[in-house]
Amino acid sequence: MNLKEIQNLIKFVAKSGVSEVKLETGDFKIVIKNTPDIKVTALPQAEVQSILPAATPAQPAAPAQPAAPQTEAAPAAAEENTGNYVEIRAPIIGTFYRRPAPDKPPYVEVGDVVKPGDVVCIIEAMKLFNEIESEVAGRIVKVLVEDGTPVEYDQPLFLVEPM
């Protein structure tokens, strides 16, 4: 099975509303799960190219690396007062993007009110852009990840004050 066939299968599963598909042929096995809290969007290669180069200029923010100790101190201070905050966490490993495209505004800013189902960011994994939705209603208190940086599974992305 080639990449194009796999992409078509993923699109079919997403449109059909089926929650899981398993396919085995010889020594090849694939399982596609369609979860309601993650939307998988396959972008045309041209759009992928327009988004990814934008991440490259964001990486030369290496001079911001000396500011990392301040960033580490900020979460420590935030942890002291986070008893009543809820974290929106990364459901997958990938690259975190706050905006749908380089020329678009971020999905959410600090102070914005979100409700369950609102898209708060995108995590790109293997050239698929996954919209991450809020599972809680509340106000965004803090963005914990820099735009264009890698994130791990279950890593906190946002702090939300529940409503």
Image (cartoon, grey):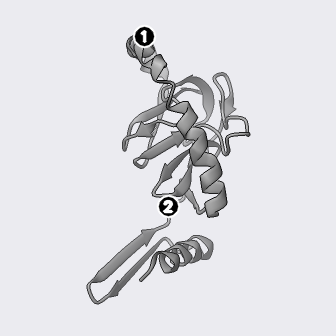
Query: Which x, y percent locates residue 149?
Result: 47, 36
User: Is 44 located above or below residue 68 in the figure?
Assistant: below
Query: Which x, y percent locates residue 54?
Result: 61, 40
Residue at mark 1: 70
Secondary structure of the residue carrying tag 1 is helix
Q: Let me know if residue 110 appears in the view.
A: yes
Query: Which x, y percent locates residue 152?
Result: 37, 41
Residue at mark 2: 35
Q: Tell me: 116 left or right of 65.
A: right
Q: Let me know if residue 121 appears in the view.
A: no
Query: What residue sits 57% from the left and 57% below the top?
Result: 39
Query: Which x, y percent locates residue 136?
Result: 56, 38
Q: Tell me: 44 left or right of 85.
A: right
Query: What residue sits 57% from the left and 33% below the top?
Result: 57
Q: Earlier in the sequence, mark 2 or mark 1?
A: 2
User: Is 99 located above or below residue 15 in the figure?
Assistant: above
User: Is 63 located above or below residue 140 in the figure?
Assistant: above
Amino acid on which the number 2 mark rests in the picture: Thr
